[in-house]
Image: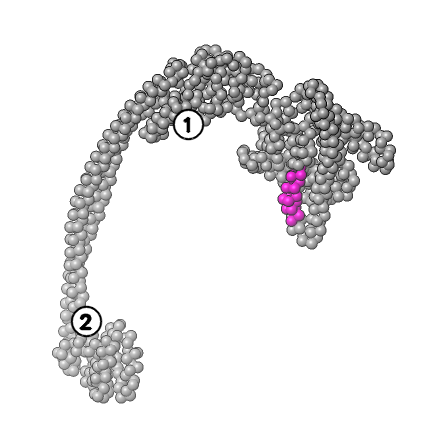
């Protein structure tokens, strides 16, 4: 990481900030340095000017919808004017813009008035067209109604006469003279009521009846019997709507029925009259055809009239819509000239530039002669920074002073995040960032944390099948999600799944089934002793590796004596001695023989170095005292207690590896009891609850037992200066 200092004439400050903000290569910082302490700053408050320009731009946006806000930097002369006389330039630009807004308001008012006049004219013509149409349609419909009325009336009168004559003829035919003489009552009844009528007639045994069909729906009913029941029968006829014969035939026809010869003559006369009506019906039909043709012509005329009316309305609307568009286009041309005018472009550029100059996040020093910008730039981004400054120099046709230097020891220097390869592992950087941000002098443990975390997880969750599931899930999530929590889980699932597969082969386990593959290393459940020794050996290796990294960090920070104590050689010797001594004790079984073994002297040497480290550092910096002695004793105790606690804490790996293997026994038992469902159930338990617990334990061992040996995480995150191109 380098400290960069850029010195430029004040008018080019905005151009440089714009280029740096777009490129995102440096993190700006407060300008420091003895050479700048006596510099007289120019007091210019750009904030009120920016607010005035911003409000004016908002007013312009109200009238110019869709105005492009992509900022273009002002020309060189305008930048010079801005820095020489910011108040005067802003006032001049805002005055020009106000005149443009007035012109825009006038144009909009004229356009709206013209469009309103066109719409009112269109409405008047449409109303006139509708009124003429309604009047003509009403006349046509009245004519149609009159013809339909005449047509119906002609047909109805003829049909009525024909039905009446036909009824008389059928009645005369149906009335036999002899029966008519013997009965005391005759009526015309509906066939559907004969059954009910019969029920009432049977109440008097001396009454009987006879029916003669007149037509498909009606019959003549003859009532025979005693005359004393006449009134009863007449009441029945009234109730059941039976028509008396005298209501159908006139008295003359009734008398003709009593004389057979005259009856036949009446039948013939009725038949002749029916034939005459048939001929008359044909004439009526011809007349009705004429009515129908005339009605058809009128309806066709009405239809064409309606079509013409609709077309006339559409033509009117299209005409006035065209006129409206022409008006809008004419005014739009004038508005477009204003939109692309110099005043609007300068207002947008001025708004952007003033936003940069008034941004309180940009710690720039300005004088009347120069503007000074300082920041931090990662070593990898220095070529890009130099290229950007070169492009700015070509644009302004002047040289810009830029100096790159190493940071001072006391300065807090930010650290950029690493670029992990392959790229899909980049979200896994969160695994380190959650513990802290590495400082500039610390080893960046990005790859180390992923490797150690996945390694510990595989030790506890060794299973080929389940590891493959998480590997596939991780690849899917990494491909599907580029940001957010899912992308981070996908990046972690990939190494976790690979580690679980590797240890699954070493343990000989596939989806909690043992025996499908032979264990390369050992089975945790059947070789508990080997498992414990392996875990303790891994614990010692991890802790010593972490302490080696801690010693390197002390040396890089300029404190080589820090590599001797509790975070360096002293703790390494104590842990190795402790481990080797435990192995020797297990071999000989005599605790007293341990005191003469070289491992005991290693532990003592480690504790002595841990005690001496803070004392030697105090002597080096010449502030030795009782405080240094207390720190030495504290370092001794921390090395002894913390190393023992950390070493035994790693035994949780063995415990969870055994728990996973125990699930294999449960899967085997449930498989006999429940069939395949038992195996599926135990795998679900393992891939949910046990997966979460193994992940949490791996994190705990990573953050405390391993990273606690070397990683402080007190660094500052590198946050490159960036710009929002569009104003809020």
Query: Alpha-carbon neighbours of circle 1 within 10 Å: few (<14), some, or many (≥20)?
Result: few
Residue 54 percent location from the top left of the image = 38, 26
Check the image and report above or below for 316 versus 556: below
Residue found at x 54% / y 15% = 33
Mark 2 secondary-structure assignment: helix
Answer yes or no: do the residues labelled 2 and 1 have beta carbons within 8 Å?
no
Q: Which residues are magenta?
A: 681-698
Q: Nearer the viewer, mark 2 or mark 1?
A: 1
Q: How many marks?
A: 2
Query: Alpha-carbon neighbours of circle 2 within 10 Å: few (<14), some, or many (≥20)?
Result: some
Residue found at x 37% / y 16% = 85
Check the image and report above or below for 678 versus 487: below
User: How would you classify the magenta stretch by its main secondary structure?
Assistant: helix
Query: Foreground residue, 510 or 406?
Result: 406
Check the image and report above or below for 375 versus 279: above
Query: What residue is disc 1 on?
Result: 727
State left or right for residue 192 relative to residue 677: left
Give whichever of discs 2 and 1 has the lower sequence position: 2
- Does the magenta run of residues contain 469? no
Residue 319 percent location from the top left of the image = 23, 35
Residue 30 percent location from the top left of the image = 52, 20
Residue found at x 14% / y 64% = 280
Query: What residue is disc 2 on?
Result: 166
Residue found at x 73% / y 38% = 651
Query: Foreground residue, 322 or 161?
Result: 322
Residue found at the very far left of the displayed protein: 252
| Mark 2–mark 1 distance (CA, rounded to whole Å) | 98 Å
Picture disc at residue 512: none
């Amino acid at each position: 990481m380098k400290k960069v200092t850029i010195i430029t004439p004040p008018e080019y400050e905005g151009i440089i900030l714009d280029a740096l903000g777009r490129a995102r290569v440096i993190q700006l910082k407060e300008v420091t340095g003895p050479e700048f302490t006596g510099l007289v700053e120019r007091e210019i408050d750009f904030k009120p000017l920016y607010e005035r320009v911003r409000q004016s731009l908002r007013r312009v946006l109200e009238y110019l919808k869709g105005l492009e806000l992509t900022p273009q930097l002002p020309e060189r002369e305008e930048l010079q004017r801005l820095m020489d006389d910011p108040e005067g330039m802003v006032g001049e630009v805002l005055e020009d813009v106000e005149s443009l807004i007035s012109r825009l308001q006038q144009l909009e008012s004229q356009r709206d008035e013209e469009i309103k006049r066109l719409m009112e004219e269109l409405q008047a013509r449409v109303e006139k067209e509708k009124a003429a149409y309604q009047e003509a349609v009403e006349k046509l419909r009245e004519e149609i109604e009159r013809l339909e009325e005449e047509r119906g009336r002609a047909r109805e009168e003829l049909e009525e006469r024909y039905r009446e004559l036909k009824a008389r003829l059928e009645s005369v035919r149906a009335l036999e003279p002899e029966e008519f003489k013997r009965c005391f009552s005759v009526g015309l009844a509906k066939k559907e009521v004969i059954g009910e009528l019969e029920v009432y007639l049977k109440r008097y045994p001396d009454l009987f009846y006879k029916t003669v069909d007149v037509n498909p729906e009606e019959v003549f009913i003859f009532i025979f019997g005693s005359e004393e029941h006449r009134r009863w029968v007449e009441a029945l006829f009234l109730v059941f709507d039976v028509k008396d014969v005298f209501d159908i035939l006139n008295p003359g026809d009734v008398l003709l029925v009593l004389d057979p010869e005259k009856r036949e003559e009446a039948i013939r006369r009725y038949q002749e009259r029916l034939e005459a009506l048939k001929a008359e019906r044909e004439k009526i039909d011809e007349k009705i055809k004429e009515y129908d043709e005339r009605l058809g012509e009128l309806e066709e005329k009405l239809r064409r009239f309606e079509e013409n009316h609709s077309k006339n309305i559409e033509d009117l609307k299209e005409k006035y819509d065209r006129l409206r568009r022409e008006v809008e286009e004419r005014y739009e041309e004038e508005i477009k000239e204003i939109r692309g005018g110099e005043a609007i472009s300068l207002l947008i550029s001025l708004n952007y530039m003033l936003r940069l100059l008034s941004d309180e996040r940009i710690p720039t020093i300005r004088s009347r002669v120069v503007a000074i910008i300082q920041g931090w730039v990662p070593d990898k981004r220095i070529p890009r920074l130099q290229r950007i400054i070169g492009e700015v120099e070509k644009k302004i046709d002047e040289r810009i002073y830029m100096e790159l230097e190493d940071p001072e020891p006391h300065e807090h220097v930010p650290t950029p995040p690493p670029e992990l390869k392959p790229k899909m592992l980049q979200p896994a950087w969160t695994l380190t960032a959650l513990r802290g941000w590495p400082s500039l002098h610390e080893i960046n443990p990005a790859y180390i944390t992923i490797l150690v975390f996945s390694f510990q997880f595989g030790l506890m969750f060794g299973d080929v099948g389940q590891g493959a599931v998480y590997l596939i899930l991780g690849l899917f999530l990494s491909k599907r999600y580029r940001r957010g929590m899912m992308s981070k889980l996908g990046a972690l699932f990939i190494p976790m799944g690979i580690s679980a597969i590797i240890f699954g082969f070493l343990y000989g386990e596939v989806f909690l089934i043992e025996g499908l593959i032979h264990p390369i290393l050992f089975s945790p459940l059947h070789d508990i002793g080997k498992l414990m020794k392996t875990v303790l050996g891994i614990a010692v290796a991890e802790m010593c590796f972490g302490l080696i990294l801690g010693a390197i960090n002390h040396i890089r920070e300029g404190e080589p004596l820090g590599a001797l104590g509790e975070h360096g050689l002293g703790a390494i010797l104590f842990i190795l001695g402790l481990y080797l001594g435990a192995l020797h004790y297990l071999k000989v079984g005599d605790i007293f023989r341990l005191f003469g073994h070289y491992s005991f002297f290693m532990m003592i040497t480690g504790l002595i170095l841990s005690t001496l480290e803070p004392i030697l550092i105090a002597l080096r910096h010449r502030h030795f005292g009782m405080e240094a002695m207390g720190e030495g004793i504290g370092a001794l105790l921390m090395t002894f207690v913390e190393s023992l606690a950390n070493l035994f804490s790693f035994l949780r790996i063995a415990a969870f590896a055994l728990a996973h293997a125990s699930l294999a026994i449960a899967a085997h038992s449930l498989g006999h009891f429940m069939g395949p469902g038992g195996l599926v159930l135990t795998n679900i338990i393992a891939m949910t609850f046990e997966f979460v617990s193994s992940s949490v334990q791996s994190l705990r061992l990573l953050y405390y037992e391993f990273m606690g040996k070397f990683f402080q995480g007190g660094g500052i995150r590198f946050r490159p200066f960036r710009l929002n191109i569009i104003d809020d």
